[in-house]
């Protein structure tokens, strides 16, 4: 077994404090001299630990008289970016990514229907009203549409699915934007937007009724129809093609 370096052990302890909420967003880490004394390490070792945490986006370092290390809580963006790199390297197709989205999102609709609260329904109705007000503005509408999808996953209450969704969402969003930019205002685009909005309205009705099974079925059908429209003849397009 490899014995961890002292810098790794210091980074591990500071990481634990951030993850456990002992250090929160924007907090300044104690002064270097204080941390050196606490961990009984040299300045180079402490700064190596800082570099580890900075590479994980858990801290940022400011230089100068008012500088120092500031804490950033984990938000999933690092995992999402890294997942994107892996999918690019493996030549994953957009078809792969959309299929994964269905696997993640459809069950979330059922989970939401089974646990919805009055506050959840208020947020869903607000999101529907926002989208309806933007339906004649395709670029703005698609962004509201995508926020609704993210909201369904968020309100499902399953944090693991929320994280997994975030890992594919930035790719899905990019693909959707590029498609709408090319297709905005066409007859097919208008038809797809209206169909998608009706599916969102129906989902909210099913969530309000607590019908988990039908909510899952309707959302899966909506996703499959949306994917057919959005992929078009791009089913073999890779994530690398999209993001380059």
Image (tube, grey):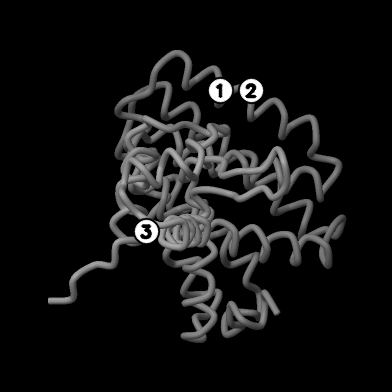
Mark-to-mark CA distance, 2 and 3: 26 Å
| Residue for badge 2 | 126
Residue sitting at x 57%, y 85%: 236
The residue labelled by disc 3 is 103
Would you say 197 lies left or right of 119 here? right
Q: Work out whether residue 174 or residue 198 is closer to the camera in this orientation and state it.
A: 174
Residue under numbered circle 1: 123
- Mark 2–mark 1 CB contact (< 8 Å): yes
CA separation, marks 3 and 1? 24 Å
Mark 2 element type = helix
Where is residue 28? Give x, y as percent.
54, 35
| Label 1: element kind | helix
Point out residue 86 in the picture as x, y percentages from the top left corner. Answer: 47, 77
How far from the left and from the top, in percent, is residue 1?
Answer: 12, 76
- Residue 158, given in percent of the width and then of the height, sits at 33, 39
Q: How many marks?
A: 3
Determine crowd level at label 1: few under 14, some 14-19, many 20+ residues with C-alpha closer than 10 A: some
- Mark 2 touches mark 3? (CB < 8 Å): no
SS category of the residue bearing label 3 = helix
Q: Residues within 10 Å of mark 3 (few under 14, many from 20)?
A: some
Q: Residue at x 85, y 41 (%)?
A: 136
Q: Quadrant of the C terminus?
A: bottom right
Compared across the picture, whether 72 is left or right of 65 comes to left
Q: Is residue 157 above or below residue 118?
A: below
- Residue drawn at (45%, 41%) of the image: 153
């Amino acid at each position: 077994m490899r014995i961890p370096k002292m810098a790794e052990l210091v980074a591990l302890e500071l990481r634990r404090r951030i993850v456990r909420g002992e250090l929160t967003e924007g907090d300044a880490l104690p002064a270097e001299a204080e941390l050196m004394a606490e961990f009984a390490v040299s300045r180079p070792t402490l700064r190596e630990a800082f570099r580890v945490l900075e590479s994980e986006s858990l801290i940022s370092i400011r230089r100068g008289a008012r500088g120092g290390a500031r804490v950033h809580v984990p938000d999933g963006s690092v995992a999402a970016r890294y997942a994107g790199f892996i999918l690019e390297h493996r030549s994953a197709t957009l078809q792969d990514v959309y299929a994964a989205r269905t696997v993640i999102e459809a069950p979330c609709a059922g989970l939401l229907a089974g646990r919805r609260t009055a506050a959840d329904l208020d947020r869903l109705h607000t999101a529907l009203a926002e989208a309806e007000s933007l339906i004649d503005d395709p670029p703005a509408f698609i962004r509201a549409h995508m926020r609704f999808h993210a909201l369904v996953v968020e309100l499902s209450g399953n944090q693991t699915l929320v994280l997994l969704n975030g890992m594919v969402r930035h790719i899905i969003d990019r693909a959707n934007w590029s498609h709408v930019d090319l297709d905005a205002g066409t007859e097919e685009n208008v038809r797809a937007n209206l169909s998608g909005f009706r599916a969102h309205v129906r989902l909210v009705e099913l969530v309000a009724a607590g019908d988990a099974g039908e909510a899952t079925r309707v959302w899966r059908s909506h996703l499959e129809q949306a994917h057919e429209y959005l992929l078009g003849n791009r089913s073999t397009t890779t994530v690398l093609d999209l993001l380059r």
